[in-house]
Image (spheres, rainbow, N blue to C red):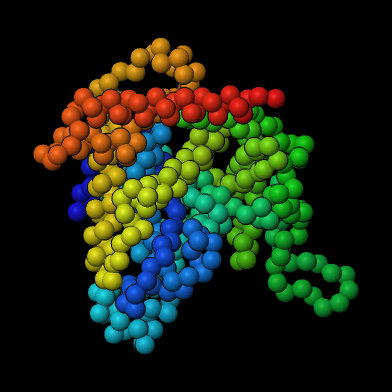
């Protein structure tokens, strides 16, 4: 079922070209003695270690529209020891399933999309996945353009490092190869490097105004523990005093604006994770079996796709009055929210509900209030 939904989403005219795939994990606190994948593990939402289920998810995004595509349940390593064999059978973990890290699960999701012929321009991941040389190498070998966030203490070289055996005039002869030159830099020390050319880029309109930030890039080399040398872009984003860093294998002719646009798509999977929990009940499920978790994932993807498709259809069929942009002084008018679609559904379903006219009036009122609120926030932010 989820495969059919994934194909329908990715072949929709909106996502059929120019899309970016985004990866992230999400943890949910759970209770109960029998819980597939349940373990005391870090829950970012709670900011602590607690009994949780963790899923690795994949989303697709383009022009502000986004949707979950796929996911895999993370099973901690101890779930595959002999003591858990009976529990694995009880909750229906497939016999062929073996321990996989979250990074390996994410790569499995990407490979599945590739095998299904999903068309996408790039893949974006956060620091947990981006710092994995193994994952970056897999994507590069598969000719996938990536934007991989990395920690600020990551080390790079600004010219190709020389690898060899040190030659000492005195003492025993060296046996192992190492980096002979040049000096490595921590990326957090590079934003003020004289070779950087910063550009202020306007990325896309948002409901809070235009997304604008400073970006710079430079070619760098990294050296792995096995002395594998890799050349790639270091993309730096600056907002105020905050800097974020990403590796990318984008072709040399790729514009900085294109790289910045693709890198900043990663925000949308956080919205997908949030909507899944706050609107579609993902945080309330109690899936004790492996199959139930997969079924719930499929239902969530389908529910979210219904909302996304409704938004797309509404924008295509309902032209926005150009005067509204001037009236609210906004670059982007609010899209239909899940709550808006819920109200419209209530009017269409054969249940005691609002009339279509009353429901539409509520939606208009809601969008009007949101527009006025955003206008007020933007004006307050612009005040000296």
Q: Residue 352, located in which quarter of the rendered image?
A: top left
| Count of labels in the image | 0
Is 42 or 160 nearer to us in this picture? 42
Q: Residue at x 27, y 21 (%)?
A: 318
Seen from this angle, which residue lies furthest top? 323
Q: Residue at x 48, y 43 (%)?
A: 267
Vertical order, 216 against 123 (above or below): above
Q: In which quarter of the image is the N terminus?
A: bottom left
Seen from this angle, which residue lies furthest right? 170
Is 350 or 67 nearer to us in this picture? 350
Q: Residue 87, located in which quarter of the rendered image?
A: bottom left
Is 95 or 42 nearer to us in this picture? 42
Q: Give residue 274's position: percent from left, percent from top.
A: 41, 49
Is 305 or 247 nearer to us in this picture? 305
Q: Give residue 25's position: percent from left, percent from top.
A: 44, 57
Query: In the image, 346: left or right of 33?
Result: left
Vertical order, 224 against 370 (above or below): below
Q: Quadrant of the C terminus?
A: top right
Q: Give residue 28's position: percent from left, percent from top.
A: 41, 62
Vertical order, 162 against 178 (above or below): above
Q: Which residue is drawn at 31% across and 29% down?
A: 363
Query: In the image, 175: left or right of 38?
Result: right
Vertical order, 121 against 151 (above or below): above
Query: In the image, 293: left or right of 56?
Result: left
Q: Which residue is drawn at 76% across and 60% down?
A: 180
Residue 269 in sight: no
Residue 198 in sight: yes
């Amino acid at each position: 079922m989820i495969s059919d939904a994934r194909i329908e989403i990715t072949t929709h005219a909106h996502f059929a070209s120019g899309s970016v795939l985004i990866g992230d994990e999400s943890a949910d606190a759970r209770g109960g003695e029998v819980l597939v994948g349940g373990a005391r593990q870090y829950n970012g939402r709670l900011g602590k270690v607690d009994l949780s289920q963790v899923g690795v998810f994949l989303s697709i995004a383009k022009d502000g529209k986004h949707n979950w595509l796929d996911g895999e349940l993370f099973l901690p390593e101890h779930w595959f020891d002999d003591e858990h064999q009976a529990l694995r059978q009880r909750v229906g973990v497939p016999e062929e399933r073996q321990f996989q890290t979250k990074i390996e699960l994410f790569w499995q999701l990407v490979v599945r999309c590739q095998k299904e012929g999903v068309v996408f321009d790039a893949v974006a991941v956060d620091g947990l996945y981006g710092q994995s040389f193994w994952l970056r190498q897999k994507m590069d070998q598969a000719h996938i353009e990536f934007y991989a966030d990395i920690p600020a203490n990551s080390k790079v070289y600004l010219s190709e490092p020389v690898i060899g055996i040190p030659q000492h005039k005195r003492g025993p002869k060296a046996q192992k190869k190492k980096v002979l030159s040049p000096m490595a830099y921590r990326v957090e020390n590079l934003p003020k490097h004289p070779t950087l050319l910063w550009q202020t880029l306007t990325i896309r309109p948002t409901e809070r105004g235009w997304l604008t930030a400073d970006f710079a890039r430079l070619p760098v080399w990294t050296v792995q523990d096995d002395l594998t040398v890799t050349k790639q872009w270091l993309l730096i984003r600056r907002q105020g005093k905050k800097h974020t860093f990403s590796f990318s294998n984008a072709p040399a002719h790729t514009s900085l604006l294109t790289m910045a646009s693709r890198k900043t798509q990663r925000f949308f999977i956080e919205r997908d994770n949030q909507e899944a929990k706050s609107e579609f009940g993902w945080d309330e499920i109690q899936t004790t079996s492996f199959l139930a978790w997969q079924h719930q994932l499929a239902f969530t993807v389908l529910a979210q796709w219904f909302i996304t498709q409704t938004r797309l259809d509404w924008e295509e069929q309902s032209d926005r009055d150009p005067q509204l942009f001037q009236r609210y002084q906004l670059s982007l008018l609010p899209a239909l929210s899940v709550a808006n679609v819920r109200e419209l559904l209530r009017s269409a379903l054969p249940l005691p509900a609002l009339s279509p006219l009353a429901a539409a009036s509520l939606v208009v009122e809601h969008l009007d209030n949101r527009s006025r609120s955003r206008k007020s926030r933007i004006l307050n932010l612009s005040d000296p």
